Image (cartoon, rainbow, N blue to C red):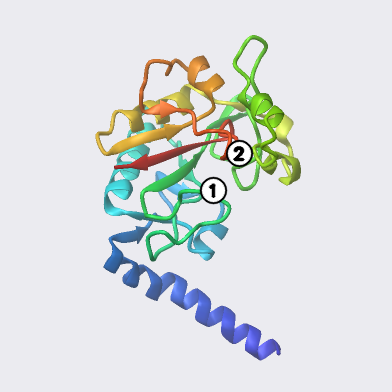
Amino acid sequence: MAKFLLAFIVIYLASTFFIVPLLSKLGNRSPLPISGHLRPLTLWTIVLNRHYVNSDLKITALNVAKQVSDKFPGSKMNYLDANFPFFDGFPLPPHLSHNDGKKLDLAFCYFDGDERSNLTPSFIGYGAYENPRNGEVNYPEECRRQGYWQYGFIGRFVPKWNASDYTIDAERTRLVIRKFSDEPSVSKIFIEPHLKERWGFSKNAKVRFHGCQAVRHDDHIHLQVR
């Protein structure tokens, strides 16, 4: 049994790093980089082959990551889930739309104490919410009231170790959103309405609400290309 398990792991990892990237090109998809200005928050994204995008999205993401790093030296743009390497329409659970190579989730940017950090309060990037303030529109509460039980479920079970050490880096996160919205290939960017208003994107038609049927987007940025 141990030999079988070891053989499976070796074959799986060899396929993941050497065979799947080559085959994905047949469908105009390729893996996002493992290191550099643009990188995965967790290597499990790579191991599970959830980091594939089409050529337009890859070029756009690399371009924006470089611009953000130029503005904030040493800054890394952490990506979360993208798409699987093959087959349009094949779902990427638990996402509703990450099935065509055109979608990508990015982590928010944070301070760790007084220092800009390339880490997040959630080890997977999801579930550490930037809650609405008094007087702001509160879609998490509204969606919960309407019976959309899944809307904030991630935050209930994702560990957030040392979360009290982190605060949102609004300046850097706003820059990421603005740079993507300036890209002609980008069609939509999803964040919660209270953050859209708070961060000055109320008149930006690309930045929009995703609907109660999805999950909360005050812990990450969702973007998609045309």
Q: Return the disc, 1 or 2, that comes first in the chain's sequence.
A: 1
Which residue reaches farthest front? 146
- Which quadrant holds the N terminus? bottom right
- Which quadrant holds the C terminus? top left
Q: Are marks 1 and 2 in contact (CB under 8 Å)?
A: yes
Amino acid on which the number 1 mark rests in the picture: Leu
Between 17 and 134, the residue placed more toward the observer is: 134
The local secondary structure at tag 2 comes to: loop
Q: Relative to 1, is 34 on the left or the right?
A: left
For the point 71% across and 27% down, which residue is it? 145
Q: Relative to 164, is 187 on the left or the right?
A: left
Q: Where is residue 127 shown, x and y percent of the image?
A: 65, 39
- Which residue is disc 2 drawn over? 120
Q: Where is residue 12 shown, x and y percent of the image?
A: 52, 77
Amino acid on which the number 2 mark rests in the picture: Thr
- Which residue is disc 1 drawn over? 41
Measured along the vertical axis of the image, is residue 131 above or below residue 35? above
For the point 57% across and 39% down, which residue is it? 213
For the point 59% across and 43% down, which residue is it? 125
